[in-house]
Amino acid sequence: MKAIQLTKYGSSKDSFEINEIPIPNLTNKEDVLIKVNAFGINFADVMARKGLYRASPPLPAVLGYEVVGIVEKTKDPKNSHLIGKRVLALTRFGGYAEYAVSTALGVIEIPKSLKNGIALALATQYCTALMAVQKTALEKNDLVLIHSASGGVGTALTQLLKHKGCKIIGLTRSDSKMAYLKDNGVDFPIDTTKNDYNLQIQKAFPNKKVRGIFNSVGGKTFKKDMQLLDNIGTLVFFGISDRTTQKKGLFSTLLQMLKIGKIHPAMLILKSQTIVGLNLLEIADKNPQQLQNALIELITLLDNKIINPVAANEFSWEQISKAHFGMENALFTGKIYVNILD
């Protein structure tokens, strides 16, 4: 089968090759083989490409966490009813290929009317956003802060939190994306390149703290966020994109830890604050049915027009480097994906 392989760590220009490799085998009882129509690109793929993601497979590797396609084969006959069905599935890598393996416990059947890009946005980005929101106790009129608010997860978080009636602060590194943030529901968009977002928020809301913070950046932003976080507030930490600006190695890892700093549990107790970590890959490994349930809920929210995924960034096999470059440098808004067959 045809697949995009990561053959060396480094820049998006020369890290990938399109090769012919064997179709993957079904080894676990719940495994299903999917003929891929389209696959998504996520920031974790960028981290893996740069050699900064420990969970990624050894080189040469096929990246990719999510696919839309048709089930062609199942390991267990009890799952044979899935054969021929168009499904949305999360994969533990292997998505950048003509065939990918997923688990029957995590796939959901989707209608032909649901476009590939929209479906893929529901997988990693909207599942992450939904589970992040579920880890908080946010209520109507609560003030929330979303890092990278114009990205896939940021877009999803904004829509889900807007539905709850929260007041949303959204961060972006580009003035050109300010209008996108407003259109998507951000009440107070901030361009972080113009001034420190911490100071801008304190100036705009002098007598109010932030009840919920969604951070995918890490680095120094963690300390700033803790200064903004209200008592009984929650900070959900689901990424460290700041790590991509540093080289691979122990020194850079230690530097990242110093940037983030220490939090003593006694301080959390005193203020009744919560810091939550969220890793979708770990959830997919330990409890794939949780992801399946999240996808089912998201389909309902989509049908009821409560969420509106943005998926305008479609690429071909040969444009994988361009897609990765855009993802790494925050050039796009919403979902980024490669369409094999619509």
Image (tube, rainbow, N blue to C red):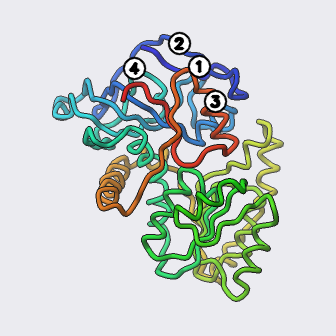
- Viewer-proximal residue, 28 or 207? 207
User: Disc 1 versus disc 2: distance between alpha carbons?
Assistant: 10 Å
- Viewer-proximal residue, 15 or 271? 15
In the picture, residue 115 is in which quadrant?
top left
Q: In the rendered view, would you say 142 is above or below 191? A: below
Q: Residue furthest bottom?
A: 207
**Which quarter shows the C terminus?**
top left
Give yes or no for contact between labels 1 and 2 (Cβ–Cβ under 8 Å): yes
* Tag nearer the camera, 1 or 2: 2
> What amino acid type should be assigned to the residue bearing mark 2?
Asn
Q: Please name the residue that numbered disc 1 is placed on.
A: 60
Q: Please name the residue that numbered disc 4 is placed on.
A: 24
Report x, y in % for residue 108: 29, 43
Say which label, 4 or 2, has the lower sequence index.
Answer: 2
Say which label, 3 or 1, has the lower sequence index.
Answer: 1
Q: In the rendered view, would you say 54 is above or below 156? A: above
Provide the secondary structure element on which disc 1 rests: loop
Left or right of 242 in this view: 237: left
**Which quarter shows the N terminus?**
top left
Q: Residue furthest top?
A: 20
Report x, y in % for residue 19: 53, 12
**Disc number at residue 316?**
none
* Tag nearer the camera, 4 or 3: 3
- Viewer-proximal residue, 188 or 235? 188
Provide the secondary structure element on which disc 2 rests: strand
Left or right of 136 in this view: 214: right
> What amino acid type should be assigned to the residue bearing mark 4?
Pro
Badge 4: how crowded within 10 Å, few (<14), some, or many (20+)? few
Provide the secondary structure element on which disc 3 rests: helix
Say which label, 4 or 3, has the lower sequence index.
Answer: 4
Q: Please name the residue that numbered disc 3 is placed on.
A: 322
